[in-house]
Image: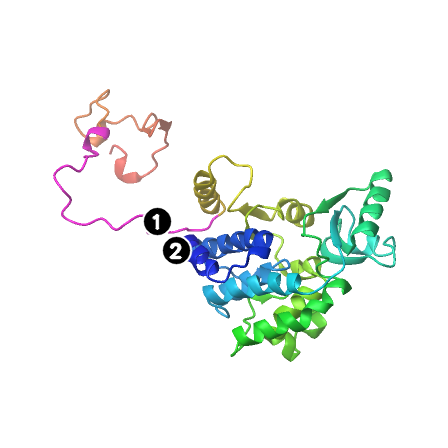
């Protein structure tokens, strides 16, 4: 799937989109991970996306095909770059929306409501950088985010809306109804019954780019004891989910940017799913066994041996208080094994 996505995107690549293509490849990885989950027969009870992650929700929901998901994300970046925008900047802040909104300079918007103690701001580069320094001096966590000088989810990205809407209307000609499993993070809950929120349309995904990310609000729909599987190039939401939901919510990331072996990390994540009570169908990851097997197939019989350290003439001669099962002392209580 990754090779397919990369090849499909190459046909639409423009040289000035080098950074956006890099980000697009990360989105292609999300498509591959969604397909991986389908192979394991892991069906989610619900899903919520963060920012462009809502395109992944559209793919999971069956509203967009793989090709449409790829091009929708591509057009999102293309419209941003083809439009003349001010030099923008974004920063992650260690305060929630309610705490940071009154502290921001008038020119800065709160772009993402991540959690009660995390948000992302967006605005003009110089003003955001200065504000980050001020917060740091107050011992408030503030870190710049590499967004290619584009102030996403703010008033400054609105000039790109007409071009993005035009691209998406050509791509999404027959918008599909969103299922109840898809919890919107770009439309307030009070507006979920509006036509804009009901369909995975060009208008919906354009609105996603313009409006704040309401992840804190939408994630309240996640049960406290849920198994949250993050489908992303890196488990960025791990800290947010743990702080918001506590130890009852199990967070499983399918990837880790710093891990030396991505395949090993992914398969270990499958093991975590099983340990959390899910039933991933691991056999689907391997080709089916063809019978009869060839003569060169290794036999397992040599690995299975009997323990002859004790011998009984019959089961009635067994010492029922010292029966050992797999190295563990077992208490046998069946009346059928008791001596008359």
- Would you identify the image quadrant in which residue 79 lies? bottom right
Q: Which residue is mark 2?
A: 39
Left or right: where 334 falls relative to 312: right
Q: Residue furthest front?
A: 15
- In depth, the one of 311 and 201 nearer the eye is 201
Q: Is residue 295 magenta?
A: yes
Position in image of residue 164 (x %, y %): 63, 69
Q: Disc 1 or 2, which lies upstream in sequence? A: 2
Q: Residue furthest left?
A: 295
Number of other residues with Cα within 10 Å of mark 1, as a class: few under 14, some 14 to 19, many 20 or more? few
Mark 1 near mark 2, Cβ–Cβ under 8 Å? yes
Is residue 11 at all visible to an observer of this figure?
yes
User: What segment carries the magenta color?
Assistant: 277-304
Position in image of residue 64 (x %, y %): 50, 68
Distance from label 1 to label 2 (Cα)? 7 Å
Image quadrant holding the C terminus, namely top left
Secondary structure under the numbered disc 2 in the rendered image: helix
Q: Is residue 58 magenta?
A: no
Residue at x 22%, y 27% (from the top left corner) = 306
Q: Which residue is mark 1?
A: 285
Residue at x 70%, y 61% (from the top left corner) = 214
Secondary structure under the numbered disc 1 in the rendered image: helix
Left or right: where 294 falls relative to 339: left
Where 115 sits versus 57, above or below?
Answer: above
């Amino acid at each position: 799937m990754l090779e397919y996505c990369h090849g499909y995107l190459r046909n639409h690549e423009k040289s000035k989109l080098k950074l956006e293509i890099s980000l697009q490849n990360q989105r292609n990885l999300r498509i591959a991970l969604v397909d991986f989950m389908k192979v394991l027969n892991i069906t989610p009870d619900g899903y919520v996306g963060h920012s462009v992650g809502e395109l992944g929700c559209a793919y999971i929901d069956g509203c967009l095909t793989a090709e449409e998901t790829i091009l929708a994300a591509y057009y999102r970046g293309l419209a941003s770059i083809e439009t003349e925008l001010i030099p923008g900047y974004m920063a992650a802040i260690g305060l929630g929306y309610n705490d940071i909104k009154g502290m921001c300079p008038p020119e800065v918007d709160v772009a993402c409501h991540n959690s009660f103690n995390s948000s992302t701001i967006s605005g003009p580069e110089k003003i955001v950088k200065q504000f980050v320094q001020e917060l740091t001096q107050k011992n408030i966590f503030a870190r710049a985010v590499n967004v290619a000088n584009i102030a996403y989810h703010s008033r400054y990205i609105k000039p790109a809306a007409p071009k993005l809407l035009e691209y998406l209307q050509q791509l999404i000609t027959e918008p599909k109804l969103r299922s109840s499993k898809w919890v919107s993070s770009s439309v307030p809950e009070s507006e979920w019954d509006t036509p804009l929120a009901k369909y995975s349309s060009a208008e919906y995904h354009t609105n996603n780019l313009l409006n704040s990310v309401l992840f804190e609000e939408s994630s309240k729909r996640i049960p406290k004891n849920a198994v949250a599987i993050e489908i992303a190039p890196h488990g960025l939401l791990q800290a947010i989910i743990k702080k918001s939901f506590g130890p009852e919510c199990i967070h499983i990331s399918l990837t880790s940017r710093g891990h030396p072996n991505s395949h090993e990390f992914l398969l270990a994540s499958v093991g975590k799913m099983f340990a959390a009570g899910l039933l991933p169908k691991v056999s689907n990851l391997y080709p089916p066994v063809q019978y009869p097997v060839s003569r060169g197939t290794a036999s397992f019989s040599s690995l299975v041996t009997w323990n002859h350290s004790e011998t009984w003439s019959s089961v009635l001669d067994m010492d029922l208080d010292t029966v050992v099962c797999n190295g563990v002392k077992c208490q046998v209580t069946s009346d059928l094994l008791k001596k008359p």
